[in-house]
Image (cartoon, rainbow, N blue to C red):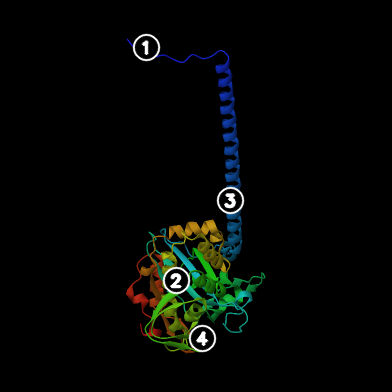
Amino acid sequence: MSHVSTPQRSSSGGSSHGGRASRGRKRERTGRRRTGRKILLALVILVLAAGGTGWWLYSDLNSNIKGVDLDEALGKNRPEKLPTSGQNILVLGSDSRAGANADLGTGKVAGARSDTALVMHIPEGRTRATAVSIPRDTLVTRPECTKSDGSTLPSAKRVMFNSVYSLAGPACVVKTVEQMSGVRMDHFMEIDFAGFKGLVDAIGGVTVTVDKPIHDTSSGLDLSAGTHKLDGTQSLAFVRTRHGIGDGSDLGRIGLQQQFMIALLSEIKKQDLLGSPTKSFKIADKLTESLTTDSQLASLTKLAKFARSMNGVDPSTMETIMLPVAYDKTDPNRVVAAEPQASTLWKAIRSDDDIPESAKKSPATGG
């Protein structure tokens, strides 16, 4: 049998060597712990700094959004909500010339109007959407509304739809749309000219294709037939032009507005915003600084939650139609809701049903 010899510890030198080694290991462990604490402290500082920056950015964007309490402004006398999980959203484009909008080349007109109005209907399932444009020259019955200064604006018949905003603000526009349609607006969003222009520039422009050249000296739009990538200023002119298309009325430009809306939504959806936080913030900043919503959406977290719930809607499949209208018999420069088409349209939306083809025909456009 073979034996394996083991080294014998010395009772003197070996013990001293072992003690030094032990103390060395302790110092090494202590050094590692100190280094570890320094790294941990640095990471904590970085996390806190990042968190502080994130909170500052969040707070900055959040404070941009303006909210309107529709329940308080409109009271309880409103249409019933949809019988399903569908949603109706009133989207307004404000033509305010005040403040940041004063240098946009939009003309010297006091006050503001709802230059663009869309009822966005998202049926149950939230995988598709229909946008119904309300011509701004439509004659409507304006209900009694409370103005921003607390005074009462009496009801009136045969007023231009886009004048409601300038007289009593967005809540009165919501009330007017609900009264004329019988459709309850679950939410409303408004973006003004400056925000629209800034948003387009922030995403790098929007590509559109036009079949015919557009030359409009009023809006400054000059496009040849074909495909164009528009910057913010050109985009604003594109959605506002009317003298260079059709009969020069508001009805002609609604088609361009709807076309542009789909192109804009598609551009935003296809961009890798998560891969570019700087660009994401820039877009969010431009959007929120000119955004007004109902109070239920007036925060980043609420907007983000709502946007996620609509993630299944593909902009390319969005249906765009115009409220069926006919030229007013008394004033041919104005239009009125065409019947029975308009009533059929609103009834389908109230029931969250498919909109019949007959409800999409507008006598004023020959459709």
Which image quadrant is residue 294 in? bottom right
- Mark 3, residues whose alpha carbon is within 10 Å: few (<14), some, or many (≥20)? few
Q: Secondary structure at mark 3?
A: helix
Tell me the amino acid under the disc marked 3.
Gly
Q: Which image quarter is the C terminus in? A: bottom left
Query: Which mark's residue is nearer the viewer, 3 or 1?
Result: 1
Tell me the amino acid under the disc marked 4.
Gly
Tell me the amino acid under the disc marked 2.
Leu
* Mark toward the start of the polypeptide (2 vs 1): 1
> Residue 51's mark?
3
Q: Which residue is mark 2?
A: 264
Percent across and percent down for residue 1 are 32, 10
Tell me the amino acid under the disc marked 1.
His
Q: Secondary structure at mark 4?
A: loop
Q: Residue furthest top?
A: 1
When the figure is inspected, residue 204 is found, relative to residue 103, above or below; the finding is above
* Mark toward the start of the polypeptide (4 vs 1): 1
Q: Which residue is mark 1?
A: 3
